[in-house]
Amino acid sequence: MGSKERILRQKEETRSNILKAARSIVKEEGWQGLSMRKIADKIEYTAPIIYEYFSNKEAILQELTCKGFSILSKDLEAAKIESVDPAEQLEAMWLAYWNFALKNKEMYQLMYGVEMTCCAQRNTESDYPYVLISNVIAELMGEQDPKPEIIKQKYFTFFSVIHGLISINIVGNGLSDEINKQILKDAITGIIRYIKE
C-alpha cells in the first residue's frame, strides 16, 4: 500500500474515531455534555486536530444526523422487502422506525429535535425515509397517481402518532413495553385501515 493510501486510510479512521467518541460521550452525558475538548480527550488527540476534520461541534452534529438518517433508511428498506403487500410493508417499516428510535435514542433526539435543537437540514438523507414510506402509502391507496398532498397527510398521520409515542418514551419514564407495543399496533393498523378505505 502506498503512502497516499495509508494517509487517506488514517484520516478516515481518525474521522470515524471522532464520531464514535462523540456518540460515546453523548450516551454517557447527553448532548449537552458534548464538546470538542471532550472528544479530543476521549481519543487522546489535541483539540486542534479535531478542528482539522470538523470546523465546529455543529459540523459533527450534522455528520451524525446524516449518519442517523442513513441507518434509519437502511432499516426501512430491510423492513420493506419482508413482504410484497403494501399494508404489511407499512407495518414493518413503522415498526423498524420505532425500533431504530429506541435503539438509537441519542441519535433520534438529534435527528428530530427531541429535548434539543434539531440539527437536521433538509438533504437527501433526511428526506429518504419520507420518500420510502410515502411510496408505499401511495401504493396502498391504490389510486392512479394519488395527490402528493394527500400522501403527505397520510405520512404525517403515521409520523405524528409514532414520533409522539417515541418522544414520550425518550423524555419521560415512558410506558411499559406491553403498552407501547399495543398502542403502536393499534395506531398502525388503524391508520392502514383508514388509508385503504
Image (spheres, rainbow, N blue to C red):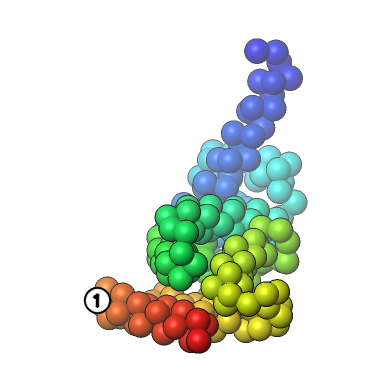
Residue 109, image x, y percentages? 52, 69
Q: 111 or 69: nearer the eye?
A: 69
Residue 189 vs 19, above or below: the answer is below
Residue that protrudes farthest toward the top in the picture = 1
Name the side, left or right, on which 54 lies relative to 137: right
> Splitting the image into 4 quarters, where does residue 152 fall?
bottom right
Residue 148, image x, y percentages? 71, 78
Residue neighbourhood size for the residue with mark 1, other residues' Cα within 10 Å, grouped as few (<14), some (14–19), many (≥20): few
Residue 8 vs 62, above or below: the answer is above
Label 1: state its secondary structure.
helix
Residue 175, image x, y percentages? 30, 80
**Residue assigned mark 1:** 178
Q: 120 or 153: nearer the eye?
A: 153
Name the side, left or right, on which 166 lies relative to 183: right
Q: Inspect this view and state whether residue 154 appears.
A: yes
Residue 12, image x, y percentages? 64, 34
Q: Inspect this view and state whether residue 38 appears.
A: no
Tell how many labels. 1
Residue drawn at (63%, 77%) of the image:
143
Q: Amino acid at mark 1?
A: Glu
> Splitting the image into 4 quarters, where does residue 179 fall?
bottom left
Residue drawn at (66%, 32%) of the image:
11
Residue drawn at (58%, 69%) of the image:
139
- Check the picture and name the quadrant holding the N terminus: top right
Residue drawn at (46%, 71%) of the image:
87
